[in-house]
Amino acid sequence: MSTAQTDTATRNDPITFAVLRNAFRSMCNEASALIERVSYAPTITEGHDYSVSVLTPDGRLISHGQRDQAPHMGTFESSVQHLVKTVPEFKPGDVYIFNDPYTGGTHQNDVKIMRPIFHDGELFAFGIALCHWPDVGGPMHGTFNPHATECYAEGLRMPPLKLYENDEPVQAIWDLVGMNIRVPKERVAEIFAQYEAGKLVERRLLGYVEKFGAEVVKDGFEDTMDHSERLFRAWVSKLADGEYEFEDFGDRDLGREGEPMIRVHAKMTIEGDQVTIDWSDSGPAPIASWGFARPALLSATYDGTMHCFPELAPLNHGVVRSINIVSKKGTCVDVEEPTPVTGYCSGAYEKVDAITMACWGQALQHVEPRRVHAATVNLQNFCTGGVHPTTGQPFVSYMWLEGGQGARTYADGNSFYMMIFIGGASNQPNEVLERWYPMYYDEAEAVIDSCGDGEFRGGFGISRSFTAWGDTELVVLGDRERVGPFGLAGGTNGGPNRVVLNIDTPKEKNLGMFASKAILKAGDRLHFSSNGGGGYGLPWDRKVESVLDDVIEELLSLEKARDVYGVAIECRDADSLDYAVDEAATEALRAALRAKDDRARGLGPGEVHPGGEQLFRRPEELYAS
């Protein structure tokens, strides 16, 4: 490390350092809010699937918005560094569009618009604004293609292309984009929103240059990074040197014979204040769309780390340069072109994020166990498209479900969140979706018994079921139907994710997590529900009153309360919420469960994860002192 990184002093005085550090984040927040107001798609305006960042001229991350998407932020360095390598010269007013996942990360739907920012004729910084466009072409509405075996079946892939020159549109590029995507008029709104977000970052940053001077602001960049690095390395140095390993699996590789599970493995090594996370022993790149390229691996690893050290937020290059991340080309977490990648966030991303937290958790449980997390809800990419029966206009929708977060060593996981994906996740309201698309929502409620069980349970999944009133084509690209989000210390796995057509009727059909071009006819009802998070500790150690509360809230069934938690509850009058615990029966049930723990060990929903059971200590052991 440099002297500046080891010394606690900053280049600027402490007040200027604090002002600028918060200013960098604030300008990104303001630009993100602009995107939310100007864009058209509910994916962006309601679901907040966007991100804004500011970076140095050599592509080092300075800051990002607080409500931005976690999978995006760690890829911005790769994106700008590739832009700098590709473009020989930048000029004021140049703006570039870019979505190539192999050099910039994520997937084709995540379209970045990047603006070089100049001061006194010198390249001073980059502003980058990303939105998930609901469609970027390809054979499937929404671009996700569960059965793709090459990226060429996954929509338009763009290297860095000049979208504006001297702040004037380059019409040929606009035409190229418009001719290759569905509903291009809507995407024009996203382009303008992202373009204006970059201009806003430029105005705010140059405003601080005018106030403080260019050198002070540049020193602010470095101070911000150094500060985060000092905090992070101080934490790492508290942890025991050694190796910490964990692994997780995707449900299946659709394109490979026998559809085997997809293995993701990490070994984290701590030596002093240096950490190395090695993903080389992960399984081979899948044939179908599940894995991701190295820039997305970096982002997922950073995000899992940030969940364990939230005081480091926002992510910047100080954290990035403090973690040595090793991967092997051709594995599922470092795929090469043309391996398909649109499913990255529902596939490899969540596994890498959860495994990273599990590796950190093994070290942290001995120092600060409140930072340990079980696994969380997995994303389902859910797209519908067609022609609206009322307007006669084509439409494409993209949505997801929030779900259960993993339990902690001291508290239940939150329900109905997506914390590892979006910092300020919120759902897309049913009323908005009904106005845009031909569907009526029948429910938006918790999925009973979906939590991973434990002394502290995981959060619950959510069901957003709807009835189609016009013909609609459906594409689903998800995971965690067969392999649940893992529990720890004897807690069970959460889940499963489900997509079922006409549930509880003679026409019921499980569409699963890899549906492509499924046709919904008017009157068809679709059940769409998400995972609960993994549990922590032994279920029969859970407080009886907590089990009772979950039963009263209709989150937990009487059967699960009895069979899994060992709590005998009598429902005397459900309408008046009159429930009573049979204390004698409960004592006997719990004694029997403690005497013989014959629960299934495995990776499936409701099973006890073997690795999580063996590597993590139970709460009474963690907090004994």
Image: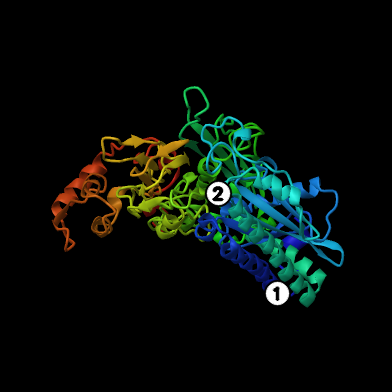
226 relative to 239 in the view: left or right: right
* Image spot of residue 562 (x, y percent): 21, 47
Q: Quadrant of residue 296?
A: top right
Residue in the picture at 50% in, 22% down? 257
Which image quarter is the N terminus in?
Answer: bottom right
Q: Which mark is residue 586?
A: none
Element assignment for label 1: helix
Q: Which mark is residue 14?
A: 1
Residue 81 in sight here:
no
Q: Which residue is mark 2?
A: 134
Three-letter residue code for mark 2: Pro
- Seen from the viewer's position, the closer of residues 205 and 393 is 393
Element assignment for label 2: loop
Task: Rate crowding at label 2 as few (under 14), some (14 to 19) or many (20 or more) other CA atoms within 10 Å.
Answer: many
Residue in the picture at 49% in, 29% down? 254
Which mark sits nearer the N-terminus, 1 or 2?
1
Three-letter residue code for mark 1: Pro
* Image spot of residue 292 (x, y percent): 60, 39
Identify the residue at the far top of this view.
257
